[in-house]
Every structure is written in structure tokens, then in C-alpha cells.
Image (cartoon, rainbow, N blue to C red):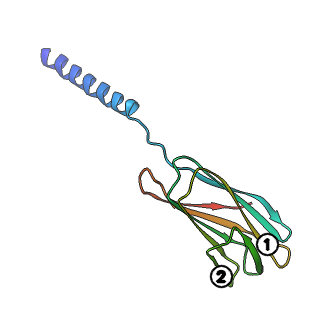
Amino acid sequence: MQLKKIHTLELYNISLIILLLVFLTPISATAAVTGKYINASGNTTVLEISVDNPAPPSIIVEQSPGNKNKVISANPRPKKVSGNGNVKWLLTNTRPGKQQFTVTMADPLQGSVRAILRYRDPANGQFIEKSITP
């Protein structure tokens, strides 16, 4: 009988310690990079990204307006514009805040447009890829 009481008390203490560790362990802040289309009609698309603190050291922003759309300009200046209409920016030394990316096509947008954000979480180094559609 005495042994059963001691065993129950040990289980209770272990459970209490585990609960305390779970609830008192600080949760590390992770960088949140989000995006949304401000405009995706006519011959211009405007993508806005928001970067929280802490900001990842670099972010790759890639926009795909589709094969039928010829890109004539992009702002800010992209790292690469491919023949199939993909536009790619490489952001380095990023800081918290918002930034807009504008792409102008020769003709009105045909089909769907999407963007991909790629970065590494500064807290844990995990690779994150987010897809954004209008």
C-alpha cells in the first residue's frame, strides 16, 4: 500500500514537471513574410510583401504572370526576367516593413498570375516557401 502511494506521487510530480516545462518554455519568434496582390488586372500587377521582425537575411520573390504575357518592365529592377515571363528578385539585407513589386506586360494579363516567396527562418534556419495568388 505504501509503495503504491509513492509510485502515484512520483507520477504526479513527473507530470507536473512536464507541464511546467511545456508551458514555461519561451516560444521563439519566427520571421513572418507575407504577400498579397494589390492589383492583378489590366496589363499591370502589383505585389506587396510584408516582412516582420526579425527579418530573414534574404528573400527570393518570384512572379509568374504566365507564358502568354510578355513583360515590358518591372520595378524594382529584377535580378532576372526569363523568356517565359517569370520575374525574379533577390532581396538581401532585408529589414522589417512593406515593399511593392510592379510588373507591366505588353498586353492585358491573360490567365492566372502567382508569386512565390522563398526564405530561411532566421530563428531556426528552416526553408520556407509561400505561394501567393490574387
| Residue 129: mark in rendering | none
Relative to 131, 15 lies left or right? left
x and y percent of residue 3 in the render? 13, 19
Q: Which residue is mark 2?
A: 82
Q: Amino acid at mark 2?
A: Ser
Q: Classify residue 77 by image quadrant.
A: bottom right
Relative to 54, 6 lies left or right? left
Quarter of the N terminus within the rendering:
top left
Q: Most extreme residue toward the top, as rendered? A: 2
Residue at position x 84%, y 71% in the image: 43
Residue at position x 35%, y 29% in the image: 19
Residue 111 visible to an observer of this rendering: no
Q: Is residue 60 above or below residue 15?
A: below
Residue at position x 86%, y 69% in the image: 42
Q: Amino acid at mark 1?
A: Thr
Q: CA distance from mark 2 to mark 1?
A: 14 Å
Q: Which residue is mark 1?
A: 104
